[in-house]
Amino acid sequence: DHGKEFAGFKEIEACGIAHYFAHPYAPHERGTNERLNRELRLYIPKNQPIESVTNEELTMISKYLNWRPRKCLGWKTPLQVFFGDLSEKFD
């Protein structure tokens, strides 16, 4: 909620790209993000320093999260949505 991720949103807005800001203290407006954070906390507890997580562990965690089908994606995995259905392209 207090990061600098959207510091340059005016430049993005100038390109005609739609954007959305959730209201402060309204986690229900960020449902997918909150769920992903909860899943991430299964592997990295809140009190564990991120520096203590190895690159191999981060790779394993990202594979698990990106290969898991999601209801919000029509039961596709994030990788399927990101890369599209490659099987259709090679038929």
Image (cartoon, helix red, strand yellow):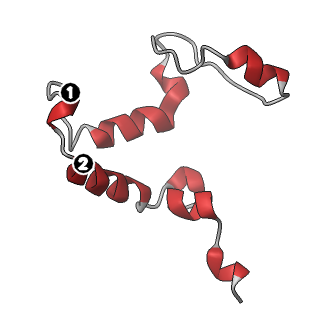
Above or below residue 52? Residue 64 is below
**Side of 62 relative to 3 (left or right):** left
Residue highlighted by disc 2: 55
**Number of residues whose C-alpha sits closer than 10 Å to that of mark 2, classed few (under 14), some (14–19) or many (20 or more):** few
Q: How many numbered marks, from 0 up?
A: 2
User: Whole-Å distance between the Cαs marked 2 and 1?
Assistant: 18 Å
x and y, in percent, of residue 12 in the image: 74, 24
x and y, in percent, of residue 69 in the image: 46, 61
Q: Residue at x 25, y 37 (%)?
A: 41
Q: Residue at x 71, y 26 (%)?
A: 19
Q: Residue at x 52, y 56 (%)?
A: 78
x and y, in percent, of residue 59 in the image: 30, 54
x and y, in percent, of residue 84 in the image: 65, 66
Q: Nearer the viewer, mark 2 or mark 1?
A: 2
Tell me if label 2 and label 1 are in contact, CB under 8 Å: no
Above or below residue 41? Residue 5 is above
Residue 13, located in which quarter of the rendered image?
Answer: top right
Determine if residue 76 is in view: no
Residue 23, located in which quarter of the rendered image?
Answer: top right
Q: In the drawing, what numbered circle is on residue 82?
A: none
Q: Secondary structure at mark 1?
A: loop
Above or below residue 1? Residue 30 is below
In front: 20, or 26? Answer: 20
Q: Residue at x 49, y 55 (%)?
A: 70
Quarter of the image with the C terminus is bottom right
Sequence-first disc among 2 and 1 = 1
The kind of residue tagged 2 is: Asn
Residue highlighted by disc 1: 46
Above or below residue 36? Residue 91 is below
The kind of residue tagged 1 is: Lys
**Side of 29 relative to 1 (left or right):** right
